[in-house]
Amino acid sequence: MIDFITNKIIPVFTNIMIPEILTIISIFVGLLFLFSLLSKNNANKISYTFVIYVVLTSVLSLLLSVSVIIYALLIISFIICVVVMFSTEIKRSVWNTKTSKTISSEAANTVRNNHKLVTHNINEIVKALQNMSKNDIGAILVFSNTKIPSSIIDSGVKLDSDISSALIESIFFPKTPLHDGAIIIQNDKIQAAGCFLPLSQESDLPKELGTRHRAGIGVTEMLNVTAIIVSEETGIISVAKGGKITRYADSESLRKTLKEYYWQDLLENVKDNKSNKEEKGGKDII
Amino acid sequence: MNTVKKSKGLTIFLNVLFSLVLALLIFITINVL
């Protein structure tokens, strides 16, 4: 055993150079991604199984002196199994890193130049939310100024229509084909309706929050968006942002939310692109 | 709250430890083989 360590393992470290260090770092980063993915999804048992599997495979491969290809295949096969099992979660984490807080300056300028349009849109959304809340109609609206993954948009029906309270209320009217999904609002357009959103896996959520609320929280956990949810049972309006939900939103707080979380982002983006003189004009919009 | 923070810290520590140990083990095995 000691001979094996002195003859085989120590020489590996004596000739260590930059490429070897980079190899170790790349394996380390890959494994760290795998372990953090597993621990985020409460799959610690798989992490421990993987550790035991790799240790056993490595020891046995060293003892039996099997080919490197067989050893690599054994390790890769386990990783492939994990990737297949957690394909949805991997997709989510990739979406999350790819979405940035960017918006096309053209779209931002359109909104900026239309003070009336901004006020009109906010009024229409608040009106629709309040009407649906009064009539206990369940609804979920996602406000985004980032790129929504195409799989979410494709799960519903693309609309690309102007924002109007009548349209929003019609979409969520019970027993209509699109009422069960979410509306995606991007800039001054309703991009799509009837979209399916990823559900939050958080176990600490109150029991009175149903699937619609879970979807609202889930999408804000994953993407840089704001979701407004109207409860079908109670008519309570909730606002979800960054995986956190605030319940009992009234007209004022909804307006504030829409300005802060949605239009404010547009204006901040415009400010970055414009000169100081134009920035001063931009503040008047809000 | 503290318990949650502790368990989160422990998880990160374990993840880093496992990754480091396994990365070294895989590197050694590949080189020896």
Image (tube, rainbow, N blue to C red):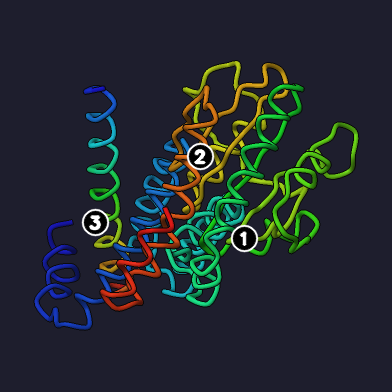
The image shows residue A165, relative to residue A246, as above or below, that is below
Q: Give the foreground label among 2 and 3.
A: 2
Residue at left offset 52%, top offset 36%: A254
User: Residue type at mark 3?
Assistant: Leu
Residue at position x 49%, y 61% in the image: A94
Q: Which residue is mark 1?
A: A188
Whether callout 2 and callout 1 share a subunit is answered yes
Give me the C-alpha separation between circle 3 and circle 1. 49 Å
Disc 3 chain ID: B
Could you tell me which secondary element the residue under label 2 belongs to?
A: helix
Amino acid tagged 2: Arg
> Residue A137's x, y, as percent?
76, 27
| Image mark 2: chain | A
Mark earlier in primary sequence (2, 1): 1
Q: Amino acid at mark 1?
A: Asp
What's the distance in space between the residues labelled 2 and 1, CA to CA? 15 Å
User: Is residue A166 toward the left or the right of residue A52 in the image?
Assistant: right
Which residue is identified by label 2?
A255
Q: Is residue A115 above or below residue A38?
A: below
Q: Quadrant of residue A172?
A: top right
Mark 1 residue crowding within 10 angstroms, few (<14) / some (14–19) / many (20+): many
Q: Is residue A204 left or right of residue A139?
A: left
Above or below residue A273? Residue A188 is above
**Where does the image place residue A120, in percent across and percent down from the top left?**
62, 51
- Give the quarter of the figure containing the N terminus of chain A: bottom left
